[in-house]
Amino acid sequence: MGKGFVNVSGGGGSEEKLTAHLEDKNNPHEVTAEQVGAAKADHTHTAAQVGARPNTWTPKLADVAFLGNQPISAVANDTIENWATLGSGYAWYCTGGLLNNQPSPFGFLVSYVNGLDVSQIWRSQDAGPTYMRSGNANGWASAWVQVSMDGHTHDDRYYTETETNNLLAGKANASHTHPVGNITGVLPVSKGGTGQTSLTALMSAMGAGKIVAGTYTGNGNESMTINLGFTPKAVLLLPADNGVSMLYECYGFNNNQYSNPRESALCIQGQTILNGSYKVMSVEASGFTVYCYLIDAGNRYQTNYYCRGNESGKKFNYVAFG
């Protein structure tokens, strides 16, 4: 037979047989992979043959393996070994109770496998909480643990965003200021105030003495004590009544002449002012005492003593220094 022709054995109809042979794609000559140097369909590669993944490689959704619908479908088969065999990827579940403590019937499961180390994330289909679990050759380290804050609630100790904004709306900024007219209460020294509620307290805080001024009316008794609530260092006494021109005096001495007339008296602590041998005023532990003596001998050549500091119905002014 010449070049370009194939000798097809058997009977007549050679053209038809040739055409059928040429169209037969099912390896009619039974050529093996070894004969043509090809790899078997179920061949595998070692890690060294595959090589390392490039550092610049970014996986895409198409690169993530889909492990199938419910690839582990029985609690007894929910083991580290079985998931390690499946390898990394994601799966879809639509039936509950197929996994140990399965969080929900419907959800997506993402599984990362490195040898016998398995880490998984479960996300419920209804956007519910997210869960995690992991394990190794010793088994699952724990059951599914919720890690998402979705669906969490607070008790009444907490406020919603709207409630918080409403509460803050009525508050001033931390850097706000006030005019002097808006300040009430006691302004502390650190803010430029005195820190005291009264003049007396201020003077005491400053180490200054007390100053008390007042008026009293005499009762005509031989003595009367004016209570100040403290021991004065000095008291100045003056008549406040037109009927009293002299606080104390002596008359008739030296041929009807006044001797040492006084319109006022200044008595210091520890001192008693005398008119002759008669008391005019003295400083006490809690104030001062005034006296009244009207001694009239009836003779102009004899001494007549007058101490009017407590004369009945007469008014007197005083200033006490603490």
Image: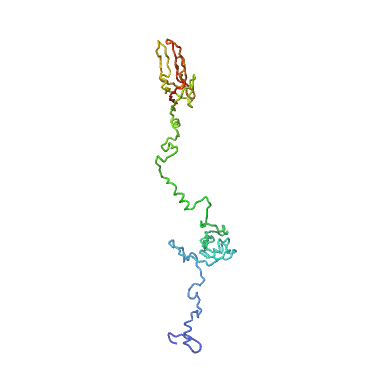
Residue nearest the observer in this picture, 12 or 172: 172
Query: Quadrant of the image for the C terminus?
Result: top left
Q: Across the whole image, how many numbered discs are drawn on residues?
A: 0
Q: Position of residue 83 (x, y in %)?
A: 55, 63
Left or right: 186, with 98 as reference point: left
Asked if 153 appears above or below 25 in the picture, the reply is: above
User: Which one is in front, 227 or 84?
Assistant: 227
Q: Position of residue 68 (x, y in %)?
A: 52, 67
Find residue 317 and report its horizontal and vertical position in percent. 43, 24
Residue 130: x and y, percent? 52, 59
Question: Closest to the observer: 142 or 251?
Answer: 251
Q: Is residue 254 left or right of residue 77?
A: left
Query: Which colour style is shown?
Result: rainbow
Q: Is residue 142 left or right of residue 259?
A: right
Q: Residue furthest right?
A: 76
Quadrant in the picture for the N terminus: bottom left
Q: Nearer the viewer, residue 161 or 247?
A: 247
Quadrant of the rendered image containing residue 273: top left
Height in image: 61 above or below 275?
Answer: below
| Residue found at the very far bottom of the displayed protein | 12
